[in-house]
Image (cartoon, grey):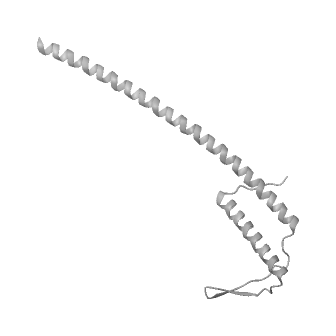
Amino acid sequence: MLAIPEVTNNEVVMSALALFLGHHFLLRRFIRQEAGVKETSTTEISGQPLHFVKDEQPMTVAAHAAVCGQLGGRVLTLEHEVKEIRSKMEKDKIAIIEAGEDRAIKIHDRINLAIEKIGELRGEVNRIAKV
């Protein structure tokens, strides 16, 4: 069984972007070859020459399909984990809100009891003051 290491969302996005750019580059190169356009080794971008070195052993179609399959599996696993985390966060949010409401009720009950006792004390003080 293939062990898939944990990755962050940024790593998944970067892998997908690299995969997309690799596909784009290979497709562009194939189209240029079919059209008979000769490739140059230097390209000018903003005045800075970039030198490209051709890879002597490009990835095979089978290897590419295997990597795509692994990445697809990792994406599905991550999507499932995100759903679980969101569900747990929603449950935690509800529990926190309910606990806060319970605390507020208990605080109000204690305040009401204190107000009741203060009223009784006032009544007793007023009764004693009249005597």
Which quadrant would the C terminus be assigned to in this image? Answer: top left
Left or right of 27? Residue 115 is: left
Left or right of 89? Residue 107 is: left
Identify which residue, 106 or 68, lies in the foreground: 68
Against 76, residue 98 (above or below) is: above
Q: Position of residue 11 (x, y in %)?
A: 68, 61
Q: Position of residue 75 (x, y in %)?
A: 73, 54
Residue furthest out toward the front? 35
All told, the count of numbered labels is 0
Against 23, residue 94 (above or below) is: above
Against 61, residue 101 (above or below) is: above
- Which of the 4 image quarters holds residue 110? top left
Left or right of 108? Residue 80 is: right
Q: Position of residue 25 (x, y in %)?
A: 76, 74
- Which of the 4 image quarters holds residue 54? bottom right
The residue depicted at 83 percent of the width and 55 percent of the height is 2
Left or right of 117? Residue 47 is: right
